[in-house]
Structure formats: C-alpha cells, structure tokens
Amino acid sequence: MDGKTSGPSTTMVLLVPKVPKEVVDTMSDTTTSDEAGEGSSHSGYRTPKKKIKRVCTFQEDCLKSYSWLKPAKENIKANCTLCQKEFNISHGGKNDINRHQDRIDHKKRKESAWSTISLKQF
C-alpha cells in the first residue's frame, strides 16, 4: 500500500455532557454531612441547604395606606372591610394586599361603596 486511503474519511466525535459549575464545585468537596452540618455527600455531590422561609406579619402602618384594611385575629392574615374577606399575607406582605386590591371583586365593591357614599351626601 502506498499510504493513501481509497474510501471516505471518517472522524470520530466524542460527545461529553456539560456539567454545571455547581456540580463541579461540589465534586471536589468530600466533607460528610456530619462535618458540614447541612446537606450530605454521596459520590462527591452535596444536597443544597434548605432555603429559609420568611413569614410576613400584619403591620399597623398598612392601616394608613389602605382605608379598607383591618387586622385579623391571626397576625399573618388581614381583613378587607369592603369584601368581608380574610386573606393570608404571610408569603408576600404588602404584595398580597396589593394583589387583593387589584382583584375584580374588590374593585367592584370599592366602586359601589363610593357611589353609596356620594348618594348619602344628597
């Protein structure tokens, strides 16, 4: 043979999966759960620490901003005097109050309350 190939040339491509940086960082860490305090190490992987859940409570300054709002018996809830509904504010605080305020039922009741007030003035 003269060193020349007569058939089509083939190239071999090796596919390697991309490993996320977090996994690569934890692979070099070989601490056990006893040493780390949180998470465990199995085959070089560590489970992530649990996210701390924060709980919002009713704040008295909200009464100044929202005339229709009253505190509920539980400090993680609020009462809407227009809708006569109690709703949870523990997850989003003022955002939960704003979400309630933007609901269609609340808007309708607010409009009817304003029209009632204006009729009483005559």
Image (tube, rainbow, N blue to C red):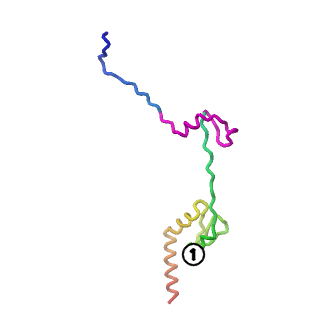
Is 16 magenta? The answer is no
Q: Residue furthest top?
A: 1
Secondary structure found at label 1: loop
* Residue 73 image point, x, y percent: 67, 68
Q: What is the quadrant of residue 2 in the picture?
A: top left
In the picture, measured across the screen, residue 63 lies left or right of residue 103, that is right
Q: Position of residue 113 (x, y in %)?
A: 52, 79
Q: Identify the residue shown where x is 40% and y is 25%.
A: 12
Residue 7's spot in the image, x, y percent? 30, 18
Look at mark 1 in the image and give the residue it sits on: 67
Disc 1 crowd rating (10 Å Cα; few below 14, some 14-19, many 20+) is few
Give the residues drawn in magenta, as a range: 17-43
Give the amino acid type for the residue marked by disc 1 in the picture.
Answer: Ser
Residue shown at 50% from the left, 86% from the top? 119
Name which residue lies at 58% across and 34% down: 27
Left or right: where 100 falls relative to 31? left
Looking at this view, name the residue that lies furthest to the left.
6
Which residue is farthest bottom?
A: 122
Instruction: State whether residue 121 is above or below residue 39.
Output: below
- The image shows a total of numbered marks equal to 1
112, 26: nearer the viewer: 26
Residue 90 sits in quarter: bottom right
